[in-house]
Amino acid sequence: MPSKKIILEPLKHFYDSFKEEMSVEDHMEFYCNRKTEDGETFLRLETYDSEKLSRVVMEEYSIKSKMRGSVIMTFPRPDNDVPIFFFQIGGRGDRSIAVLDISPTLASIDYSPLMPVYEKYRKLLELGDSKVAWLDKTCSPYLLHCQYEAIDCDLFIEAMRAYLAVWLDHYYRPGKTLSDPLERKLVTNAIYKFKYVLHHYDPAYGIFAKSWGKGAADAFVHLECADHPAYRPPDTLVSKVRPWENKGLNILWSERAQLLAMDGPAGEQDARRRTVEESAAAAGYGIITAELYKCFGSEIGLASTD
Protein backbone atom coordinates (compact mmCIF):
# COMPACT_ATOMS: atom_id res chain seq x y z
CA MET A 1 0.00 0.00 0.00
CA PRO A 2 1.15 3.62 -0.37
CA SER A 3 3.59 4.73 2.32
CA LYS A 4 2.48 7.09 5.10
CA LYS A 5 4.53 9.81 3.41
CA ILE A 6 2.65 9.34 0.13
CA ILE A 7 -0.69 9.41 1.96
CA LEU A 8 0.02 12.53 4.01
CA GLU A 9 1.96 14.54 1.41
CA PRO A 10 -1.14 15.55 -0.64
CA LEU A 11 -2.95 16.72 2.51
CA LYS A 12 0.02 18.87 3.49
CA HIS A 13 0.43 20.25 -0.03
CA PHE A 14 -3.24 21.13 -0.32
CA TYR A 15 -3.23 22.81 3.09
CA ASP A 16 -0.06 24.79 2.33
CA SER A 17 -1.42 25.85 -1.07
CA PHE A 18 -4.85 26.85 0.17
CA LYS A 19 -4.41 27.87 3.82
CA GLU A 20 -4.59 31.61 3.09
CA GLU A 21 -7.99 31.09 1.46
CA MET A 22 -9.51 28.98 4.26
CA SER A 23 -11.30 30.24 7.34
CA VAL A 24 -10.78 28.82 10.84
CA GLU A 25 -14.14 30.24 11.97
CA ASP A 26 -15.89 27.08 10.77
CA HIS A 27 -13.05 24.62 11.37
CA MET A 28 -14.01 21.15 12.64
CA GLU A 29 -12.04 18.00 13.41
CA PHE A 30 -13.32 14.41 13.71
CA TYR A 31 -11.51 11.27 14.77
CA CYS A 32 -12.97 7.82 15.29
CA ASN A 33 -11.23 4.45 15.52
CA ARG A 34 -11.65 0.85 16.58
CA LYS A 35 -8.91 -1.69 17.15
CA THR A 36 -9.58 -5.42 16.94
CA GLU A 37 -7.46 -8.49 16.35
CA ASP A 38 -8.05 -7.88 12.61
CA GLY A 39 -6.40 -4.44 12.79
CA GLU A 40 -7.38 -0.79 13.24
CA THR A 41 -10.10 1.10 11.38
CA PHE A 42 -9.90 4.86 11.80
CA LEU A 43 -10.83 8.13 10.13
CA ARG A 44 -9.19 11.45 10.84
CA LEU A 45 -11.18 14.24 9.20
CA GLU A 46 -10.61 17.99 9.14
CA THR A 47 -12.91 20.56 7.53
CA TYR A 48 -12.79 24.28 6.78
CA ASP A 49 -14.80 26.74 4.73
CA SER A 50 -13.75 29.65 2.51
CA GLU A 51 -15.21 32.59 0.66
CA LYS A 52 -16.39 30.41 -2.24
CA LEU A 53 -16.52 26.96 -0.60
CA SER A 54 -19.07 25.77 1.92
CA ARG A 55 -16.80 22.87 2.90
CA VAL A 56 -13.20 21.75 2.42
CA VAL A 57 -12.74 18.12 3.49
CA MET A 58 -9.36 16.51 4.20
CA GLU A 59 -9.24 12.92 5.44
CA GLU A 60 -6.76 10.23 6.43
CA TYR A 61 -8.14 6.71 6.92
CA SER A 62 -7.21 3.11 7.63
CA ILE A 63 -9.39 0.01 7.24
CA LYS A 64 -8.36 -2.93 9.44
CA SER A 65 -4.72 -1.80 9.03
CA LYS A 66 -4.82 -3.43 5.58
CA MET A 67 -5.93 -0.44 3.52
CA ARG A 68 -5.06 3.17 4.13
CA GLY A 69 -5.29 6.41 2.24
CA SER A 70 -6.25 10.07 2.11
CA VAL A 71 -9.05 12.08 0.52
CA ILE A 72 -9.52 15.75 -0.40
CA MET A 73 -12.84 17.26 -1.54
CA THR A 74 -14.01 20.84 -2.00
CA PHE A 75 -17.73 21.62 -2.05
CA PRO A 76 -18.49 25.05 -3.54
CA ARG A 77 -21.14 27.39 -2.27
CA PRO A 78 -24.18 26.93 -4.52
CA ASP A 79 -24.10 30.57 -5.63
CA ASN A 80 -20.58 30.23 -7.10
CA ASP A 81 -19.35 28.79 -10.39
CA VAL A 82 -16.41 26.90 -8.81
CA PRO A 83 -16.10 23.17 -9.72
CA ILE A 84 -15.33 20.41 -7.20
CA PHE A 85 -11.72 19.36 -6.63
CA PHE A 86 -11.67 15.63 -5.82
CA PHE A 87 -8.63 13.54 -4.87
CA GLN A 88 -7.97 10.17 -3.27
CA ILE A 89 -4.95 7.95 -2.93
CA GLY A 90 -4.80 4.69 -1.03
CA GLY A 91 -4.78 0.95 -1.45
CA ARG A 92 -3.53 -2.29 -0.06
CA GLY A 93 -0.43 -4.34 -0.79
CA ASP A 94 1.04 -3.25 -4.11
CA ARG A 95 -2.37 -2.25 -5.49
CA SER A 96 -3.53 1.33 -5.34
CA ILE A 97 -6.73 3.31 -5.52
CA ALA A 98 -6.12 6.74 -7.05
CA VAL A 99 -8.73 9.33 -8.05
CA LEU A 100 -8.10 12.84 -9.35
CA ASP A 101 -10.66 15.12 -10.95
CA ILE A 102 -12.11 18.60 -11.26
CA SER A 103 -15.79 17.76 -11.29
CA PRO A 104 -18.17 20.16 -13.06
CA THR A 105 -21.08 21.90 -11.39
CA LEU A 106 -22.13 23.66 -14.62
CA ALA A 107 -22.10 22.20 -18.12
CA SER A 108 -20.50 25.40 -19.41
CA ILE A 109 -17.15 24.85 -17.63
CA ASP A 110 -14.14 25.50 -19.85
CA TYR A 111 -11.75 22.57 -19.49
CA SER A 112 -9.10 23.86 -21.89
CA PRO A 113 -6.67 24.77 -19.04
CA LEU A 114 -6.90 21.19 -17.69
CA MET A 115 -6.78 19.24 -20.95
CA PRO A 116 -2.98 19.34 -21.53
CA VAL A 117 -2.33 18.40 -17.88
CA TYR A 118 -4.73 15.48 -18.21
CA GLU A 119 -3.16 14.26 -21.45
CA LYS A 120 0.35 14.49 -20.00
CA TYR A 121 -0.33 12.48 -16.85
CA ARG A 122 -2.74 10.02 -18.43
CA LYS A 123 0.09 9.05 -20.78
CA LEU A 124 2.84 9.05 -18.15
CA LEU A 125 0.73 7.04 -15.70
CA GLU A 126 -0.46 4.71 -18.48
CA LEU A 127 -4.06 5.03 -17.35
CA GLY A 128 -7.07 4.00 -19.39
CA ASP A 129 -10.72 4.84 -18.81
CA SER A 130 -12.26 4.50 -15.37
CA LYS A 131 -13.40 0.99 -14.51
CA VAL A 132 -15.75 2.15 -11.73
CA ALA A 133 -19.10 3.13 -13.21
CA TRP A 134 -20.27 5.29 -10.31
CA LEU A 135 -17.37 7.69 -10.73
CA ASP A 136 -18.58 8.47 -14.24
CA LYS A 137 -21.91 9.70 -12.86
CA THR A 138 -20.36 12.92 -11.52
CA CYS A 139 -16.75 13.17 -12.68
CA SER A 140 -15.45 15.03 -15.72
CA PRO A 141 -14.02 13.47 -18.91
CA TYR A 142 -10.60 14.37 -17.46
CA LEU A 143 -10.73 12.00 -14.51
CA LEU A 144 -7.47 10.20 -13.68
CA HIS A 145 -8.32 6.93 -11.98
CA CYS A 146 -6.66 3.70 -10.90
CA GLN A 147 -8.64 0.93 -9.19
CA TYR A 148 -6.54 -1.68 -7.35
CA GLU A 149 -3.74 -1.73 -9.89
CA ALA A 150 -0.07 -0.85 -9.70
CA ILE A 151 0.62 2.85 -10.16
CA ASP A 152 3.55 5.23 -9.72
CA CYS A 153 2.31 6.98 -6.55
CA ASP A 154 4.95 9.71 -6.68
CA LEU A 155 3.93 10.56 -10.23
CA PHE A 156 0.25 10.58 -9.23
CA ILE A 157 1.07 13.06 -6.44
CA GLU A 158 2.82 15.19 -9.07
CA ALA A 159 -0.38 15.06 -11.14
CA MET A 160 -2.38 16.09 -8.06
CA ARG A 161 -0.18 19.16 -7.63
CA ALA A 162 -0.70 20.09 -11.29
CA TYR A 163 -4.51 19.61 -11.10
CA LEU A 164 -4.65 21.66 -7.92
CA ALA A 165 -2.71 24.50 -9.56
CA VAL A 166 -5.21 24.53 -12.44
CA TRP A 167 -8.16 24.43 -10.02
CA LEU A 168 -6.75 27.34 -8.00
CA ASP A 169 -5.59 29.56 -10.87
CA HIS A 170 -8.31 28.94 -13.44
CA TYR A 171 -11.39 28.02 -11.42
CA TYR A 172 -11.31 28.92 -7.73
CA ARG A 173 -9.61 32.31 -7.68
CA PRO A 174 -11.38 33.68 -10.79
CA GLY A 175 -14.66 32.11 -9.64
CA LYS A 176 -17.68 34.39 -9.76
CA THR A 177 -20.93 34.69 -7.89
CA LEU A 178 -23.84 33.48 -9.98
CA SER A 179 -26.71 35.89 -10.51
CA ASP A 180 -28.85 33.63 -12.70
CA PRO A 181 -31.35 31.72 -10.49
CA LEU A 182 -31.36 28.75 -12.91
CA GLU A 183 -27.57 28.44 -12.76
CA ARG A 184 -27.75 28.46 -8.95
CA LYS A 185 -30.31 25.68 -9.06
CA LEU A 186 -28.15 23.65 -11.45
CA VAL A 187 -25.06 24.07 -9.26
CA THR A 188 -27.04 23.13 -6.14
CA ASN A 189 -28.32 20.02 -7.92
CA ALA A 190 -24.81 19.06 -9.11
CA ILE A 191 -23.35 19.40 -5.60
CA TYR A 192 -26.15 17.29 -4.15
CA LYS A 193 -25.67 14.65 -6.84
CA PHE A 194 -21.94 14.46 -6.06
CA LYS A 195 -22.66 13.94 -2.35
CA TYR A 196 -25.36 11.39 -3.12
CA VAL A 197 -23.19 9.38 -5.50
CA LEU A 198 -20.20 9.46 -3.16
CA HIS A 199 -22.09 8.04 -0.21
CA HIS A 200 -24.45 5.72 -2.05
CA TYR A 201 -21.82 3.96 -4.14
CA ASP A 202 -18.56 4.26 -2.22
CA PRO A 203 -18.33 1.48 0.43
CA ALA A 204 -16.79 3.70 3.13
CA TYR A 205 -20.05 4.46 4.97
CA GLY A 206 -20.97 0.78 5.31
CA ILE A 207 -17.45 -0.16 6.42
CA PHE A 208 -17.33 2.57 9.06
CA ALA A 209 -20.88 1.86 10.26
CA LYS A 210 -19.97 -1.81 10.76
CA SER A 211 -16.80 -0.92 12.62
CA TRP A 212 -17.98 2.01 14.76
CA GLY A 213 -21.78 1.87 14.67
CA LYS A 214 -24.27 3.85 12.60
CA GLY A 215 -24.18 6.90 14.86
CA ALA A 216 -20.47 7.52 14.38
CA ALA A 217 -20.68 6.82 10.64
CA ASP A 218 -23.59 9.26 10.36
CA ALA A 219 -21.52 11.88 12.19
CA PHE A 220 -18.72 11.72 9.63
CA VAL A 221 -21.21 12.02 6.75
CA HIS A 222 -22.84 14.96 8.53
CA LEU A 223 -19.53 16.80 8.79
CA GLU A 224 -18.88 16.27 5.08
CA CYS A 225 -22.36 16.90 3.75
CA ALA A 226 -24.46 19.00 6.16
CA ASP A 227 -23.94 22.25 4.25
CA HIS A 228 -26.58 23.25 1.71
CA PRO A 229 -27.48 21.23 -0.27
CA ALA A 230 -27.36 18.80 2.63
CA TYR A 231 -27.20 15.03 2.20
CA ARG A 232 -27.84 12.38 4.83
CA PRO A 233 -27.82 8.57 4.50
CA PRO A 234 -31.24 7.13 3.59
CA ASP A 235 -33.30 5.41 6.26
CA THR A 236 -35.94 3.57 4.25
CA LEU A 237 -35.49 3.13 0.52
CA VAL A 238 -32.50 0.79 0.50
CA SER A 239 -34.48 -1.74 2.52
CA LYS A 240 -37.44 -1.65 0.12
CA VAL A 241 -36.47 -1.24 -3.52
CA ARG A 242 -33.52 -0.70 -5.78
CA PRO A 243 -32.80 3.03 -6.26
CA TRP A 244 -33.85 4.33 -9.67
CA GLU A 245 -31.27 5.38 -12.24
CA ASN A 246 -31.43 6.25 -15.94
CA LYS A 247 -27.96 5.42 -17.23
CA GLY A 248 -28.62 6.74 -20.72
CA LEU A 249 -29.57 10.20 -19.41
CA ASN A 250 -27.19 10.02 -16.41
CA ILE A 251 -30.13 10.80 -14.14
CA LEU A 252 -30.46 9.55 -10.55
CA TRP A 253 -33.34 9.76 -8.09
CA SER A 254 -33.10 10.77 -4.46
CA GLU A 255 -34.86 8.57 -1.93
CA ARG A 256 -37.68 11.04 -1.21
CA ALA A 257 -38.31 11.74 -4.90
CA GLN A 258 -38.54 8.04 -5.71
CA LEU A 259 -40.96 7.39 -2.88
CA LEU A 260 -43.14 10.25 -4.11
CA ALA A 261 -43.14 8.86 -7.64
CA MET A 262 -44.07 5.41 -6.33
CA ASP A 263 -47.00 6.80 -4.36
CA GLY A 264 -49.62 6.36 -7.07
CA PRO A 265 -51.16 3.82 -9.40
CA ALA A 266 -48.57 1.15 -10.23
CA GLY A 267 -49.55 1.17 -13.87
CA GLU A 268 -48.55 4.84 -14.19
CA GLN A 269 -45.11 4.59 -12.56
CA ASP A 270 -43.08 3.85 -15.69
CA ALA A 271 -44.62 6.68 -17.70
CA ARG A 272 -44.36 9.06 -14.74
CA ARG A 273 -40.73 8.17 -14.20
CA ARG A 274 -39.81 8.47 -17.89
CA THR A 275 -41.51 11.85 -18.30
CA VAL A 276 -39.84 13.39 -15.25
CA GLU A 277 -36.41 11.99 -16.20
CA GLU A 278 -36.64 13.44 -19.69
CA SER A 279 -37.74 16.83 -18.34
CA ALA A 280 -34.91 16.89 -15.79
CA ALA A 281 -32.26 15.91 -18.34
CA ALA A 282 -33.49 18.51 -20.83
CA ALA A 283 -33.19 21.20 -18.16
CA GLY A 284 -29.64 20.14 -17.24
CA TYR A 285 -30.26 18.47 -13.88
CA GLY A 286 -28.43 15.30 -12.82
CA ILE A 287 -30.48 14.08 -9.88
CA ILE A 288 -34.21 14.25 -9.28
CA THR A 289 -34.86 15.48 -5.74
CA ALA A 290 -38.28 15.64 -4.11
CA GLU A 291 -38.48 19.38 -4.82
CA LEU A 292 -37.56 18.87 -8.46
CA TYR A 293 -40.06 16.03 -8.81
CA LYS A 294 -42.83 18.23 -7.44
CA CYS A 295 -41.81 21.04 -9.80
CA PHE A 296 -41.82 18.88 -12.92
CA GLY A 297 -44.82 16.95 -11.69
CA SER A 298 -46.93 20.11 -11.34
CA GLU A 299 -45.94 21.17 -14.85
CA ILE A 300 -47.13 17.89 -16.40
CA GLY A 301 -50.07 17.33 -14.07
CA LEU A 302 -48.98 14.37 -11.97
CA ALA A 303 -51.65 13.75 -9.38
CA SER A 304 -49.28 12.59 -6.62
CA THR A 305 -47.49 15.96 -6.42
CA ASP A 306 -50.37 17.56 -4.52
Image (tube, rainbow, N blue to C red):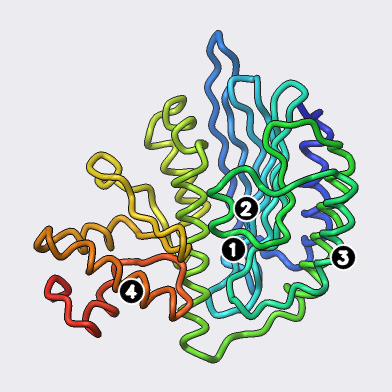
Measure how far apart labels 3 and 2 are at the Cα level.
27 Å
The label number, if any, that marks residue 75 in the structure image: 1
Residue holding disc 2:
57
3 or 4: tag closer to the N-terminus: 3
- Determine the image quadrant of residue 79: bottom right
> How would you rate the neighbour count of disc 2 (Cα within 10 Å): few for under 14, some for 14-19, many for 20 or more?
many
Q: For the point 59% across and 63% down, which residue is it?
A: 75
Q: Residue at x 48, y 72 (%)?
A: 188
Of the image marks 3 and 2, the number of the one nearer the N terminus: 2
| N-terminal label among 1 and 3 | 1
Which of the pair 96/301 is nearer the observer? 301
Q: Amino acid at mark 2?
A: Val
Q: Are marks 1 and 4 in contact (CB under 8 Å)?
A: no
Residue holding disc 4: 292
The residue at which mark 3 appears reads as 116
Q: Amino acid at mark 3?
A: Pro
Q: Position of residue 223 (x, y in %)?
A: 50, 51
- Tell me how many marks there are: 4
Quarter of the picture containing the N terminus is top right
Q: Residues within 10 Å of mark 1 (few under 14, many from 20)?
A: many
Residue 17: image quadrant is bottom right
**Secondary structure at numbered mark 3:** helix
Say if 63 sits above or below 193 in the image.
above
Marks 2 and 1 close (CB-CB < 8 Å): yes
Q: Earlier in the sequence, mark 1 or mark 4?
A: 1
What is the spatial separation of the Cα atoms under label 3 and label 4, in whole angstroms? 37 Å
The residue carrying pointer 4 sits among few (fewer than 14), some (14 to 19) or many (20 or more) residues within 10 Å by Cα, namely: some
The amino acid type of the residue labelled 1 equals Phe
Q: Nearer the viewer, residue 72 or 227?
A: 72
Alpha-carbon span between mark 1 and mark 3: 25 Å
Along the polypeptide, which appears first: circle 4 or circle 2? 2
